[in-house]
Image: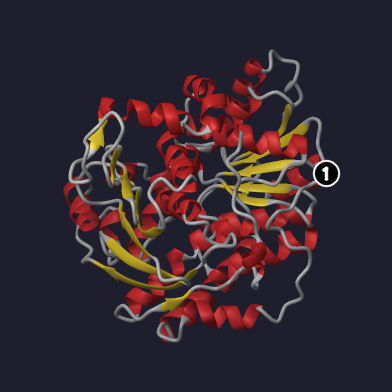
Amino acid sequence: MGSNRRDFLRKATIAGMGMAVAPNLGFGQKFQETYNIKPKFGYMGGFTAPKISTVRCAFIGVGARGSGHASQIASIEGTEVVAICDLYLDLAEKAANECKEIGKAERHKNIALYTQGENDWRNMLKEQKPDAVFIATPWEWHAPMAIGAMEEGTHAFVEVPIATTLKDMWDIVDTSERTQKHCMMMENVNYGREELLYLNMCRQGVIGELLHGEAAYIHELRSQMNEVERGTGSWRTYQYAKRNGNLYPTHGLGPIAQYMNIARGDDNFRVMTSFSSPGKGRNLYAKKNFPADHKWNQLDYSGGDINTSIIKTNIGRTILVQWDETSPRPYSRLNLIQGTQGILAGFPTRIALEGGVEGGPDSHHEWAEGEQLTKIYEKYEHPLYKRLGELATKMGGHGGMDFMMLYRIIECLREGQPLDQNVYEGCLWSAVGPLSEASVAADGMPQKFPDFTRGSWKATKPLEIII
């Protein structure tokens, strides 16, 4: 085990011990007070980096998620794939070959591969010096890799969550400010058609003043436990065994936060309380599908199958955040936003407005859904989806939201625009993870959110309705 890995594990253990012995001290506030004394460099809320005509891209991790990122980036104009790093040579070679095929052996013909152990990514960054690196690795590596990339002068784009501890989130913020490099958590759901539609409707005041939101990641993923030696289940299964809280909050929460302009002038998360159900499903699945002496049956999956949290914002709004990757039930992110004049909801897409919906029911006592929403889409379809939706759907990736996200990242880097999601938002949305763990451990005691912007969110402009 390399020294960097040992140091990371030591720090993670110390942080975990601190949370375990004092979970009721306002965990977020504790770290707020600690890190507020650090010097603040340039604020990254509306940061624009110098334009890059051709974005030289590198990738760390090309398994289930990273391989798709690499091939889609390779298809976008103004990119050059220069390097790929993975623990497994076969995955790195496959991803490189796919990129070369997309680039017709010209744009991406010289792709360097780094597959010599868990720290070879550092060599890749030093030797290749890419403009942007895309990180799709196990969660515990997100923070050290993002920080290492920025230290080497590279913009970092990280899969969700951006980190799993508040300390790592503060370190990411401090490094981004000090190096003046982007660090964006790649929350792809913010680019879904329904989410973009609702964002546009909220900004146009269709449902009045926003009061309440509901966000979730409900996705039964027990079958990942069959990936024992390689793949997502080989490392993610341990997360279910050792943590008790909301392990994956951002897919549902990101869009709700954008609807409400959270940490962008209007409002911010203030405090959260959290409870978990008993942990049963993973234990039952392991016993049913693996021998008694299998390593999965040696774990105690004590983390609750279902976690439910409530966030209270500065101006009094409420947000329900739920997580469940274990129970047998249909997929849902809830995606509900309630205003004084109506409600927008997801799974399925439904709308109810006071006075009725054009082309649908004439009362808010009934949902408009399906074909009844045709006129709504015609009137409020987000301009970004109008521009890229057809291409994104063709390119794929969760219905096109992955491609649209990656396209926008490259577009912003090439044109010197602010990113659609800044480093503070990635940390704030991800903070639900450790704060929920602290609240659950303290029998639901409220936990205060850190202000990663150190007060600058009040002057940060809302995300524009991108044309």
- Please state if 419 lies on the left or on the right of 236 as rendered: right
Does 441 sit above or below residue 342?
A: below
Q: State the residue position of label 1.
A: 50
The residue shown at (76%, 25%) is 110
For residue 52, what is the image quadrant? top right
Q: Secondary structure at mark 1?
A: loop
- Residue occupying the far front of the picture: 355
- Residue occupying the far top of the picture: 104
Q: Choose between 460 and 228: the one closer to the eye.
A: 460
**At which x and y percent is residue 142?**
58, 54
Q: Please tell me how many numbered marks the rendered image carries.
A: 1
Q: Choose between 246 and 64: the one closer to the eye.
A: 246
**What is the three-letter code of the residue carrying label 1?**
Pro
The residue shown at (57%, 58%) is 425
- Please state if 68 lies on the left or on the right of 277 as rendered: right
**At which x and y percent is residue 207?**
38, 49
Residue 149 can be seen, yes or no: yes
Q: Choose between 217 and 154: the one closer to the eye.
A: 217
**At which x and y percent is residue 367?**
22, 40
Residue 84 can be seen, yes or no: no
- Considering the image in quadrants, where does the N terminus appear? bottom right
- Please state if 76 lies on the left or on the right of 54 as rendered: left
